[in-house]
Image (cartoon, helix red, strand yellow):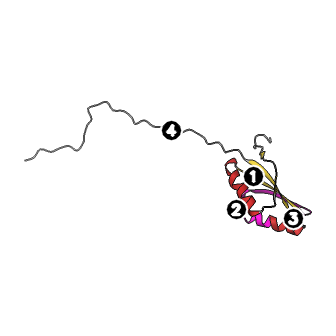
Amino acid sequence: MALPQSLHVFDAGPQRAPVLTRHNVIPFPSPRVQLPVTLLGQSEQDARSQLKALLHSPLGVYVVSTEVVRDQALVDLDIAPDDLDFTLHALINTLPHAMIGALKRRPSSRESR
């Protein structure tokens, strides 16, 4: 007759709790910048058609404000600095006659209080 065997295996060494690593890093949102763009047209209708083309392009997601004044459309784009290269290339390909303004840092919500 065979002797009964236990399924429990005991380690002879000291028992240690597993080391837990915690990642308490809070990612901060990347800074945003505003890029003013002026769409120059021959008439108000031409400026509005350029604005429509911009809003229907991939850059439409970056538009935060628009204003049509006479034969110009003033547009503000809110972008991440990492997207600047893509934004400029897409803007030049979509609207080659657009006038690109100076890049400005967008004030954070804490600065506006």
Q: Considering only order in the chain, which callout, 3 or 1, is on the residue closer to the N terminus?
A: 3
**Relative to 33, is 46 above or below?**
below
For residue 9, which quarter of the picture?
Answer: top left
Whether residues under marks 1 and 3 lie with C-beta atoms below 8 angstroms apart, the answer is: no
Which residue is the site of mark 1?
78
| Mark 1 residue crowding within 10 angstroms, few (<14) / some (14–19) / many (20+) | many
Which residue is the site of mark 4?
22
Residue type for callout 4: Arg
**Helix, strand or loop at disc 3?**
loop
**Relative to 76, is 54 above or below?**
below
**Helix, strand or loop at disc 4?**
loop
Q: Which mark is residue 41?
A: 3
Residue type for callout 1: Asp
Which of discs 2 and 3 lies nearer the camera? The answer is 3
Magenta span: 51-71
Which of discs 2 and 4 lies nearer the camera? The answer is 2
Which residue is the site of mark 2?
58
Q: Position of residue 76 (x, y in %)?
A: 80, 54
- Identify the residue shown where x is 81% and y is 64%: 51
For residue 110, which quarter of the picture?
Answer: top right
Q: Which mark is residue 8?
A: none
Task: Give the position of the C terminus as an image quadrant.
Answer: top right
- Identify the residue shown where x is 71% and y is 55%: 87
| Mark 3 residue crowding within 10 angstroms, few (<14) / some (14–19) / many (20+) | some
Alpha carbons under labels 2 and 4: distance apart: 39 Å
**Helix, strand or loop at disc 2?**
helix
Whether residues under marks 2 and 4 lie with C-beta atoms below 8 angstroms apart, the answer is: no
